[in-house]
Image: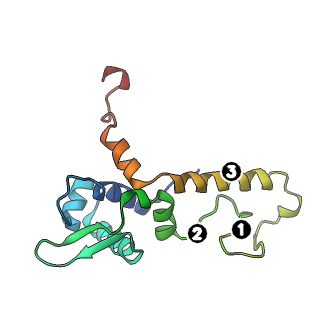
Amino acid sequence: MLKFSRKLDYAIVAMAQLCDPSLDGPISARTLADRCRVPASILANILKELSKGGIVRSVRGVNGGYELAVPPRQISVGTVVRLLEGPTRLVECVPLPGDEQDHSVCDLQAECAVKTPLRKLHGRIQQLLDEVAFDQLHRDSASAVPLGVAEDSC
């Protein structure tokens, strides 16, 4: 089953929070962790990685904390996935980015009837992750129906 890691899940939630236009300046890792309801120690490490990747910046000082380093419309979910998880592949026969040779470990590759369709599916998933930017995630989450409330009742 395809599933984001908990670390990636926390990062996506935190990034969506950092896109909140009501934030007035940097937000501390502790405050962000409280808003996201994620463990502060884990979020602090995630924020460091996002900062090293250049999409979040750390601001020092009394009113310091973290803020986006680039506009949210320029940060895709795919960017965060690759930054935190490295190159990913749906199945073993999908070459990693930059591989000129196909270094697959799959023993079935030569006779595989589904290799081409699975590679296309992998490409579509990667494309979708790259098309979803954080401004869209924040906008969509702001208009989402709260958990436990049927959409018909709103």
Q: Position of residue 82 (x, y in %)?
A: 52, 67
Q: Quadrant of residue 105?
A: bottom right
Q: Quadrant of residue 18?
A: bottom left
Q: Name the kind of residue labelled 1 in the image.
A: Pro
Is label 2 in a helix, a strand or a loop? loop
Q: Is residue 53 above or below residue 1?
A: below
Residue receiving disc 1: 95
Q: Name the kind of residue labelled 3 in the image.
A: Leu
Q: Nearer the viewer, residue 127 or 47?
A: 127
Q: Position of residue 52 (x, y in %)?
A: 39, 78
Please tell me which of labels 1 and 2 falls first in the chain: 2
Please tell me which of labels 3 and 2 falls first in the chain: 2
Marks 1 and 2, how far apart at CA: 10 Å
Q: Is residue 45 above or below residue 21?
A: below
Residue receiving disc 3: 121
The residue under the point 51% across, 60% down is: 78
- In the rendered image, the residue lying farthest to the top is 153
Is label 1 in a helix, a strand or a loop? loop
Q: Nearer the viewer, residue 71 or 107?
A: 71
Q: Name the kind of residue labelled 2 in the image.
A: Pro
Residue receiving disc 2: 87
Marks 3 and 2, how far apart at CA: 16 Å
In the rendered structure, find residue 42 and report the number of the disc placed on it.
none
